[in-house]
């Protein structure tokens, strides 16, 4: 586990570092940066699992970091006094927004959200960001029909028929996506509005028929839950 803290106030950075070490195991590596430039340089050179980001860094805008790295595979938790920017941060797909001043309990809640598979039941994101060459492209959540696991990537299957690759894993995306999405199989997350009906085939094989006539597999362990939801 490798965690990056981008915070310009040394006292607060050390406090966050201490609370982070108290929660995670001793093998966790924690990196500290105090500016947008140092943070972005570290992200380019290091493979991290979690980013803890302030939004005001010596007068620089932490959103400059967020907008650059939002499509990366790691999760981001904002720690900031700028609570008026929380909605925008969630729309960019951050996992949590911890307002300053904060205590150990509130930061622990954010860490628990990071370490458990539960969905984010707070603010709902409006788009996912994908990397296109050196640019970031925003994909509206409502344009996604379903998401398919593809090795270390995920495929965003869009209403237009296009497919966009995303760096975040299925598990990471499942935490971020709104309640309108349902995990129907280990390799598929479906936007529920796309559902037509559940199809049961011979041999106990289950599929979900979409409104556009596509068939997606349904996991055996998910069948009863999904059948109940369709009633």
Image (cartoon, grey):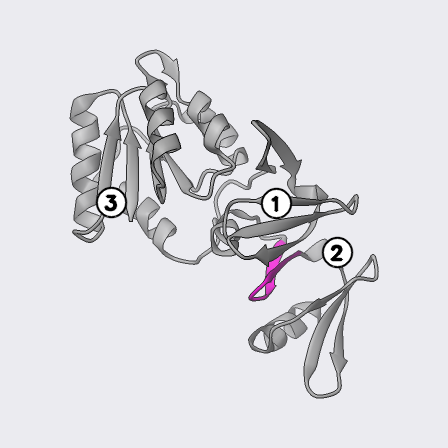
Please give the residue where the numbered disc 2 appears in the rendered image.
194
Q: Residues within 10 Å of mark 1 (few under 14, many from 20)?
A: some
Q: Residue at x 62, y 54 (%)?
A: 181
Q: Residue at x 31, y 47 (%)?
A: 111
Q: Residue at x 18, y 45 (%)?
A: 21
Mark 2 or 3: the one toward you: 2
Q: Residues within 10 Å of mark 3 (few under 14, many from 20)?
A: few
| Dot placed on the residue nearer the N-terminal end, 3 or 1 | 3
What is the tally of numbered marks visible in this picture?
Answer: 3
Please give the residue where the numbered disc 3 appears in the rendered image.
105
Asked which secondary structure carries label 1, the reply is: strand
Res 133 → quadrant? top right
Give the magenta-colored segment's residue range. 181-190
| Dot placed on the residue nearer the N-terminal end, 2 or 3 | 3
Q: Is residue 102 above or below residue 23?
A: above
Mark 3 or 1: the one toward you: 1
- Mark pair 1, 2: CA separation: 20 Å
As rendered, which of 7 and 121 lies closer to the eye?
Answer: 7
Residue extending furthest bottom? 203
Report the disc number at residue 165. Answer: 1
Assess whether residue 76 is covered by the magenta stretch: no
Q: Position of residue 93 (x, y in %)?
A: 51, 38
Q: Position of residue 126 (x, y in %)?
A: 60, 37
Assess whether residue 182 is covered by the magenta stretch: yes
Mark 1 or 2: the one toward you: 1
Q: Is residue 92 above or below residue 110?
A: above
Q: In terms of secondary structure, what is the magenta stretch mainly? A: strand
Q: Position of residue 57 (x, y in %)?
A: 32, 18
- Mark pair 2, 3: CA separation: 39 Å
């Amino acid at each position: 586990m490798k965690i990056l803290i981008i915070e310009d106030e040394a006292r607060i950075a050390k406090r966050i570092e201490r609370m982070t070490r108290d929660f995670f195991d001793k093998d966790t590596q924690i990196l500290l940066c105090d500016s947008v430039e140092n943070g972005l340089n570290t992200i380019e050179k290091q493979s991290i699992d979690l980013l803890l980001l302030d939004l005001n860094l010596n007068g620089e805008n932490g959103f400059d970091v967020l907008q650059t790295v939002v499509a990366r595979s790691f999760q981001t938790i904002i720690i900031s006094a700028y609570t008026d920017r929380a909605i925008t941060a969630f729309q960019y797909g951050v996992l949590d927004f911890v307002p300053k001043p904060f205590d150990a309990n509130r930061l622990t809640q954010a860490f628990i959200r990071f370490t458990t598979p539960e969905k984010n039941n707070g603010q709902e994101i409006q788009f996912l960001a994908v990397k296109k060459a050196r640019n970031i492209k925003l994909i509206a959540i409502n344009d996604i029909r379903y998401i398919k696991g593809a090795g270390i990537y995920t495929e965003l299957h869009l209403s237009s028929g296009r497919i966009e690759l995303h760096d975040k894993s299925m598990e990471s995306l499942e935490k971020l996506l709104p309640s309108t999405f349902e995990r129907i199989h280990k390799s598929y997350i479906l936007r529920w509005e796309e559902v037509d009906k559940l199809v049961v085939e011979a041999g106990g094989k289950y599929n979900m028929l979409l409104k556009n006539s596509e068939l997606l597999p349904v996991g055996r362990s998910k069948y009863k839950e999904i059948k109940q939801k369709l009633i």
